[in-house]
Image (cartoon, helix red, strand yellow):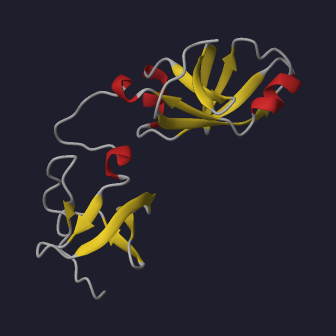
Amino acid sequence: MAAAVEAPVVVGRLTRAHGVRGWLRLQSFTDPEDNLLSYRPWLQQEGGQWVSCEVEQVIPQPKGFLCKLAGCDSRNDAEALAGTLLAVAKDVLPASDDEIYWIDLIGRSVETPDGVSLGRVDRVLETGANDVLVVVGERERLLPFIEAVFPELGATDAPLVAHWDPEF
């Protein structure tokens, strides 16, 4: 068994079995979708821990991918893995000065420029028009993740400053 990895970034999901030889349909959560193929090693959960899984082959499809993992040789094996999330260690992801990963936003505190706490980022929603931060404090708020609301992101250990009316 490979060594466990702490706090990886989820990048995809094995959705369902495909055929009888252990192939699975794979949904990518990366943007663009094929970025998933350049991140290795992939991790899957076993016994509550994230462990490395060996990828034998990945084939692009019109809606996602087909993949074959080592040790998954029958439809029953593939069905047992259906629904499994795939992740990578955060240090596998490319660093960027002009982009931020959602994982870096989750858990950060959010406050107004006047220092009024709005809560913490619970999750990020992709709406098509723009991403939305779900901020949970004394109540749940949906804040558009746009430059007008969040003109600067600041250091990752500092609160996010949201230009947002705390009464709204």
Residue 27 visible: no
Q: Is residue 102 left or right of residue 53?
A: left
Residue 115 percent coordinates (x, y): 15, 73
Question: What residue appears at the point 37 percent right and 23 percent down from the top-left corner?
Answer: 92
Query: Where is residue 70 drawn, in percent x and y?
Result: 70, 11
Q: Is residue 49 left or right of residue 132?
A: right
Quarter of the picture holding the C terminus: bottom left
Q: Compared with residue 152, is residue 6 higher up or lower down, i.e. above or below? A: above
Judged left or right of residue 102, residue 81 is right
For this orientation, the residue located farthest to the bottom is 167
| Figure check: 31 above or below 39 | below
Q: Is residue 162 left or right of residue 66?
A: left
Task: Indicate the position of residue 25 as horizontal and vertical percent values.
Answer: 69, 32
Frontmost residue, 73 versus 128 = 73
- Count of numbered circles in the view: 0
The image quadrant of residue 116 is bottom left
Q: Quadrant of residue 122?
A: bottom left
Q: Is residue 72 above or below residue 66?
A: above
Residue located at (32% from left, 51% from top): 105
| Rendered residue at 60%/29% (across/down) | 49
Q: Residue at x 18, y 73 (%)?
A: 112
Q: Measuring from the top left, give residue 165's x and y in whole percent.
A: 22, 83
